[in-house]
Image: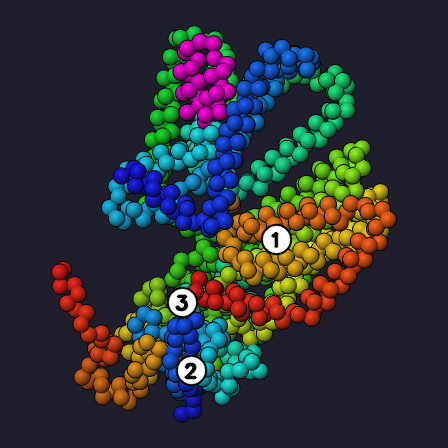
Amino acid sequence: MSEAISIKGLIKSYDDNIVLKELDLSIPKGSIFGLIGPNGAGKSTLIGVLTGLLSFDDGYITIDEMRFIDENEEAIKKEIASVLQPPLLFEQFTSIEFIEYVCEIYEIEKKGLIEKAYSLMDFFEIKDFAKTKIHKLSSGSRKKLAFVTAVLTEPIVLLLDEPFEAVDVISIERMKTVLRKLKDKGVTMIITSHILEVVENLCDDIAILHQGRIIAYLDSISRKSLKEHSTLQEIFSEYVKVEGKDDIVDWL
Amino acid sequence: MFGRLLALNWKIFVSNLNRFQLLLLIGYIMFLGIMTVNLVGTAIVVILLDTDPWMKTQIPWLTPEIYTFLLLVFANSYWVMHFSFTNLRLLNIAENRKLLGFGFPLKRLSRYLMIIGFCHPVNIIYNFTWLVFLMIQVSHFYQVLIGVAAIIFNYVLIYSIKHRFIKIVERKFIAVVVGFLFLIFGLFQAVSLFAENSQEIFVQIVPRVETLNSFLSWSPGGLLIQTVNVEYGWTTAVIIFGFLTLLIGLILIDHFRKTCEGLINPTIRKVEQQTSKLWAFLRRVMGINAGKYYYYVMIHPYNKLQLLTLAVVPVVYVPILLQVKYSAAQTILIPTILAGIPVALLAMGMANMYGYENRELLMHLQFPIKLEKQLKERFLGVIIFPLLVFYIITIFELLLIPQIVGVYKIFVANTFFFLCFMVLFIWSSYYQYQKATYSSMSYKHPIIPQKVTFVITFVIFSMGYLIFVPLENLEWYRITIMSVVIVVIGVYLWRHMSFLVNLFKKQILKRLWTE
């Protein structure tokens, strides 16, 4: 299977703090890739770099066989959509105005767009807020709106930073349904999340990012053999375990 | 417990201020002191107007009717000010309600917050001035009791009305401010007219004063005066006192319950259906980038207010200044005021160019459109409207008030003014970036940082006095310098548009990501 995203020797730092340390990662086309790790591991920074929001110090990124450099910026960005944490929305627009605006920039065909938007909003129970200003929406509705908008831009690569955060259980199930449908259409997805059960069920390959490095890569084959012995939770704890902390709270 | 809560609220207040604002706080304290002295002083002067012998020689037209009229106008104007400035946002309820999570009892917190709210210096100043104003007029002891009860009743009533109808007050805020601006500027015009035609005006006004007095005496300020200058005897006084005490108690209980409710039900989200014609219009006319940006600028409550002020000030002041016989007022002040209008419009859009959208700009970065293009479109969008106003004003000056200065000179001077401020605002956008909030009209969180506002005001007037003062034989010298500077700034801005992008990436982007 060819690669949708290829990262080689990626280094990203904030002033003196190196957040991503010579990161190498390959994500096959049409797969759902799970990126898990403790807080501060560099997951959001990696998503930020891939969306083009953050510059990087060194390394190579290739998306859909296009090198991530200035000349290809517009072409690459046209293929990417993302849902960040917290989601980026235009607060003074209504939900439908926001969707129309973003889709216009992505040059999505106008014919049938509104119908699609309303049907997806209906699916996620936010249709009633179509003409409500975004700053008045709850955090769950905001997340769902960001997700709906990202889907409507018809991306080839979808980057989701904690997409299930603040979202109710039913909507999480519906998000999973949409993601599986997108996968069937050949869309490549990266998902970061702390809800390991969802990641385990949904993703093909999973990587554990810790202190700016990939410390474990579990593809679908290796996971099958591991699954018989342990859950993702147990594997994660095994890799990320910090020794000698348990006795700190002995006084409790 | 109360002391700690007071300290907490003080810390919340101070921690929201930057160093410059802390310095301003010293100025604010001084302002409050001056305000107290001025208000109390004015109250005393108004009351003693008819008894002082020197005053009688200076203002012989002061009949008892006119004196009562002045007293009533003062009391009612003061009441309107009191109503407007009674501040409901003194306490950060969102922060205080966190205490509930740490076991602070709801009722006690609510009670303490009511007391702390009353302790704000502005509330104390207004109520103290009422006390001085009314107590000077007292002639019987029972009037003291009624006067004090009336002041307390007045305060709790204002507080309760504003608290209960906060949304209506906010929505009508612009209308209230317009009313005030017209009242204040109208008064200026009335005084200027009065100064020249006092005899004629008095002949017309005096017969109507008594009718006005009978009306004003039943308005809020008039009723407060009546509590201390009407002789109603002890029996009536006791009844009024009892009734006022009962009302005060009821309002306080109601307010206490409302505070409790506010603390445990902080926000009630209402689903409002909204569509914006302004957005649709701007999108069509200016495009999706500049249009979106200008939409954000236009819908901000501060800017609506600023636009209104910009419209009112010249409409009132320019005609007054045109009547003034001192020629410098025309040649310097009128052009300065008029040149300040497009500059103020430019400041609205450009002095904190990234503050309106904040983190939303991160989403714009993800769009498949070059950042440079997006920023340039915003930049051009921002200058279109002020530029249009700039040309209208220049043409207006040339056609309607040619006496102020020559054709070429006014054009050069205005262009120079405009471009210099554009450079200042670009600097401000990058180095003084701050998030522009939409939630309230609070003056603690202006769109443009206070230090930039101070610089703008200072520079407008100092530049105005330099640019528009006629230099007779040296005029050509100044015009040449201004023309050269215009060309230099123009060429620099045109050739260095890329610095918009570079500065954005260096200065703003990192802050947006971590915000």
Image side of residue A13 versus residue B65, left or right: left
Indicate the position of residue A97 as horizontal and vertical percent values.
Answer: 54, 62
Q: Is residue B237 magenta?
A: no
Q: Amino acid at mark 2?
A: Leu
Q: Quadrant of residue B330?
A: top right
Q: Nearer the viewer, residue B158 or B425?
A: B425
Indicate the position of residue B273 as horizontal and vertical percent values.
Answer: 50, 54
Q: Chain of mark 3?
A: A
Measured in 3D between alpha carbons, the distance from the residue under mark 3 to the one under mark 2, in whole angstroms, is 22 Å
Residue shown at the point (55%, 40%) measured from the top left: B172
Q: Chain of mark 2?
A: A
Write down the residue under mark 2.
A10
A203 over B300 or under it: above or below: below
Q: Chain of mark 1?
A: B
* Mark 3 or 2: the one toward you: 2
Bounds of the magenta span?
A: B127-153
Image side of residue B148 versus residue B370, left or right: left
Q: Amino acid at mark 1?
A: Met
Badge 1: how crowded within 10 Å, few (<14), some, or many (20+)? many
